[in-house]
Amino acid sequence: MKFELKNVTRRFGSNIAVDSVNIEIPQGQMVGIIGRSGAGKSTLLRMINRLADPSSGSIHFGGQEVSALRGKALRNWQRDCAMIFQQFNLVPRLDVLTNVLLGRLNHRPTALSILNIFTREERIMAIAALERLGIEQTALQPAGTLSGGQQQRVAIARALMQGPKMVLADEPIASLDPLNAKIVMDALKDINEREGITVITNLHTLDTARAYCERIIGMAKGRVVFDGTPDMLTSEAVSEIYGSDSHGAGIDESMTSTAIRIPGARPQAVAHPSGGIESLAPAGA
């Protein structure tokens, strides 16, 4: 099913965070969104998931206007459009298995959710999701005792439990070391390829976007300034995304803690954006 953003804008007072964005994504693409901190990447993903509403424009998926949904229909969309956050959004005191099972909340009656009653089939699904991500041995540990990389894999397992039609990942590897970053990106790519699920992820490094995404969207000052394949991402395009000070700066992404080295991938000597990670706090899992 096709996903579309039509002239989507988001304002915060006089500040325009996302400015007249038009994007069309066919089912099953792996899309990376890149840009400086403050470019509007996180705001864009939050609008897609409806954690934030567009100030104007509309969002569509499979012929349905997502931006007009309310009540149960909106909850169903947030079930179908799973969100993975930079800071995991797990419940630290609950065990890993229960955190994963929380991905079923929008599939079941409210009373059962309140009583924390999950079926045998749901528990089997949760264990299978953890096994797929190689962390089944942590099932009974409190989520807060896990490493950052393990917690992000638990968050991905929870997203899988939603049975999503689309997965959004907001800087999913920004706080991870290179090994765990690769494990997480491999997991997202596997979901995209095995289930044919559309994956849209904000990324802080160009090498990672090139290695994993068939399509890259570059944002600057709230606008889409690049939309194409990794091979089309020239130094001139990078300069437009990150600003003229990035052109020829010679900053190799291998200097960053989250750069991923993929066997067989050609090295890139392009500039890494200066500045920190986007800091819009998530409004819930």
Image (cartoon, rainbow, N blue to C red):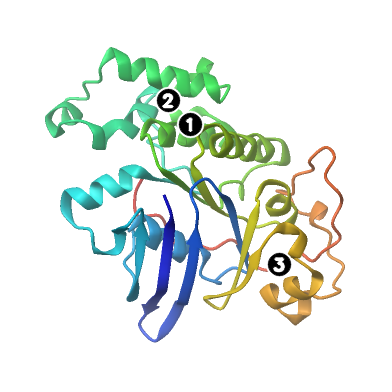
The residue at the point 30 percent across, 49 percent down is 77
Left or right: residue 224 compared with residue 254 = left
Give percent across and percent down for residue 69.
23, 58
**Amino acid under label 1?**
Val
Q: Is residue 140 visible?
A: no
- Figure check: 264 above or below 36: above
What residue is rendered at 72% in x and 53% in y? 210
**Mark 2 — residue?**
96
Is 76 left, or right, of 185 in this rendering?
left
Report if the CB atoms under discs 1 and 3 are less than 8 Å apart.
no
Q: Quadrant of residue 11?
A: bottom left
The residue at which mark 1 appears reads as: 154
Between the residue at mark 1 and the residue at mark 3, the CA separation in whole angstroms equals 29 Å
Q: 220 or 62, which is in the foreground?
A: 62
Q: Secondary structure at mark 1?
A: helix
Residue 253 location, x and y as percent?
Answer: 79, 56
Q: Nearer the viewer, residue 31 or 207?
A: 31
Q: Position of residue 27 (x, y in %)?
A: 48, 48
Q: Which residue is mark 3?
A: 273
